[in-house]
Amino acid sequence: MLSFKYLKDDARSSLVVFLVALPLCLGISLASGAPLLAGILAGIVGGLVVGALSGSHTSVSGPAAGLTVIVLTAITTLGDYYTFTLAVFLSGLMQVAMGLLKAGKVGDYFPNSVIKGMLAAIGLILILKQFPHAIGYDFDYMGNESFEDMDHKGNTLADLLFSLKGINIGALIISSLSLFSMIFWEKLAKKGIKFFQLFPGALFAVILGVVFNLFVLPSIGFALSPEHLVSLPIDGFNSFMDSLQMPTWSAFSNPAIYKVAATIAIVASLESLLSLEAVDKVDVYKRNSNKDKELVAQGIGNAVAGLIGALPVTSVIVRSSANIASGSRTKLSAILHGIWMLLAVILIPHYLELIPLASLAAILILVGYKLATSTLFKEMKKKGRTQLIPFIITIVAILFTDLLMGIGIGMVVGFFFVLKSNSYQTVILVQDKDQFLLRFLKDVSFLQKPKVKELLNSIPDEAIVAIDGSTNIYVDNDIISLIEEFVEKRAALNKKVEIVKSSLALCPYFKKEA
């Protein structure tokens, strides 16, 4: 339920999220091959529609970098952007159905080590990707999370090296001032000085960047040129209204529409569920999101996005993390950020174009630092290799591929360690001279079949054998088949196998008949 109890905190954090989201929306539009305003529209929908219906207190939705390749390919395949938005509309309906069918429980199966690795990786990506923008290298779009650049001519590491060869002194001055002012601001806010608690440091950093670029840097010959500033494809209310377009309804007969819609629905839902798991981990108040409600909210958001010509939306980790780091308390912050975006692009687009990209890069670098702190790495190291290895592999995989591919690799590794830990001491073989007892200590699934087979094969032919599963609730049929084969093999050797049974046993195979 929407609450205005923490309006002060939510309003402050919403301004920071707005500043972060604006260039990201534009960058993702550019990378997706969509009209530039489509990303802004998606950001507005993510705030006003999804924010109002969300099942999360802290999640912020908008166009996602993880969908750029899918969107670009789909627009090319379908041949027209407004045919593509019909697929976005249909994907929203599919997501609503997923939420109503309680598909949100899928999010509960993501290993904790992978989610923590994703958070750390996003933090490192923000630092690595925004550093070039902080020193004036603005050739890759803001918001790119992939290792490879949009034009496939560079990558994260190459951009870092190239940026160092052509440092823009003006951008470096602005990003440094912005970063240090935010750190200083946070320290004063923590000391309880009210003004610094009320006014967000990120907004001050942006204002400082604008002032310096307008009045200080020109006097020393380092003023930033337009390519280093925010650029908006809009000129007030009329051009904004002209950008709102319905999808091409006649494309309903095109079977490719439904394939694209299903792809967007599945990928957007997975990214949203991953984001929810991640933001719940860093939520200061340790609240749990309603995942089914979130899927419905995302679905309604995408249905609306398709109707007005916007890009598809998902819950986005970067914006959500910035929201939490700025002190958000409720989902009112997400709604307000959508309102600020709508008002700003209609009423003051030319003033927004005074904002240096270097200031915005500094904000994202600070968010990245908070996500990838050394404390997180130390915490995962303490938990042992079964947590540390999937954590590290997820980070490396995301850094050198993209978010969804990296998560997929991390999930495979994470599940391997989960299965390994779950199979630990499920079954033991005890020996006393020539007597062997195979005992099941807990429920045995087919995943333990190799272990059970190995232990049975290790028993000498001359041994006296007993098998005890009388305390188990469940023993998989594959395991029972192994036992029966073992019994038949022993019978051929004229050796009996005792199957320990109990009248209290819950597993039928080990239940003693009355």
Image: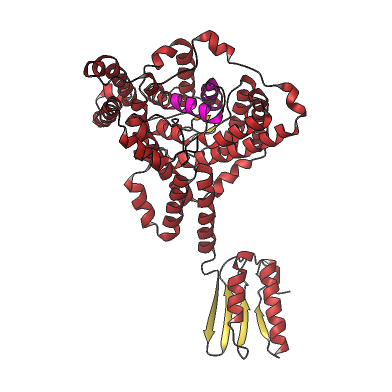
Q: How many marks?
A: 0
> Hey, which residue is sitting farthest right in the picture?
253
Residue 195 image position (x, y, % from top left): 27, 21
The quarter holding residue 497 reads: bottom right
Q: Is residue 388 above or below residue 134?
A: below
Q: Residue at x 53, y 90 (%)?
A: 433
Image-based side of 430 in relation to 94, left or right: left
Residue 199 image position (x, y, % from top left): 32, 22
Q: Is residue 484 above or below residue 410?
A: below
Q: Main secondary structure of the magenta part?
A: helix
In depth, the one of 5 and 163 nearer the eye is: 163
Residue 101 shows in the view: yes
Image-based side of 360 in relation to 172, left or right: right
Q: Residue at x 60, y 24 (%)?
A: 305
> Hey, which residue is sitting farthest left in the picture?
220
User: What is the basis of the colouring in this image?
Assistant: secondary structure
Q: Residue at x 57, y 87 (%)?
A: 435
Q: Is residue 279 magenta?
A: no
In depth, the one of 243 and 337 nearer the eye is: 243
Q: Is residue 185 above or below residue 457?
A: above
Residue 473 shows in the view: no
In depth, the one of 121 and 185 nearer the eye is: 121
Residue 23 image position (x, y, % from top left): 44, 25
The span picked out in magenta is 21-50
